[in-house]
Amino acid sequence: MSRPKGAKGFVILPRRWVVERSLAWLLHARRNVRDYETRPEHSEAMLTLAAITFMTRRLTRHPIHPTAAAPRPAQALQAA
């Protein structure tokens, strides 16, 4: 993606933020911040592990608005 012709100052390039956000999420894992691995396969494995950890945490977290989501089984048993 290149800048539009005639653009001055800050210009948001489409969809670039998605890549930057994703890389930031992967770098939250402390081991990925620096290049500690000597083999590319190890570095790739650490990035995969960070992505799996991130996705599982997002899948298992509690909803922000409890009324917007169905109650979880444990919550339904306590309410009854």
Image: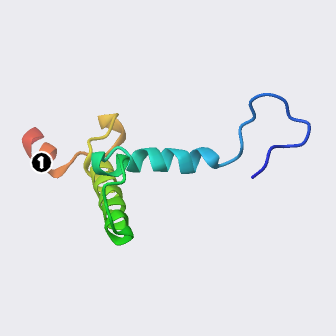
Residue occupying the point 11% across, 39% down: 79
Q: Which residue lies furthest to the right in this view?
A: 6
Q: In this view, does 80 lie to the left or right of 20?
A: left
Rendered location of residue 52, percent (x, y): 31, 60
Q: How is the image coloured?
A: rainbow
Secondary structure found at label 1: helix
Residue occupying the point 47% across, 49% down: 23
Q: Is residue 6 left or right of residue 38?
A: right
Q: Residue flagged by tag 1: what amino acid is it? A: Ala
Rendered location of residue 63, percent (x, y): 31, 40
Q: Quadrant of residue 44?
A: bottom left
Q: In which quarter of the image is residue 30?
A: top left
Q: Residue furthest bottom?
A: 41
Q: Which of 65 and 70 is in front in this view?
A: 65
Residue occupying the point 31% across, 55% down: 36
Relative to 63, say whether 72 is above or below: below
Q: Mark 1 points at which residue?
A: 74
Q: Which of 15 and 69 is in front in this view?
A: 15
Relative to 63, say whether 39 is above or below: below
Q: Nearer the viewer, residue 80 or 30?
A: 30
Q: Residue furthest front?
A: 38
Residue occupying the point 41% across, 46% down: 25
Rendered location of residue 7, percent (x, y): 86, 35
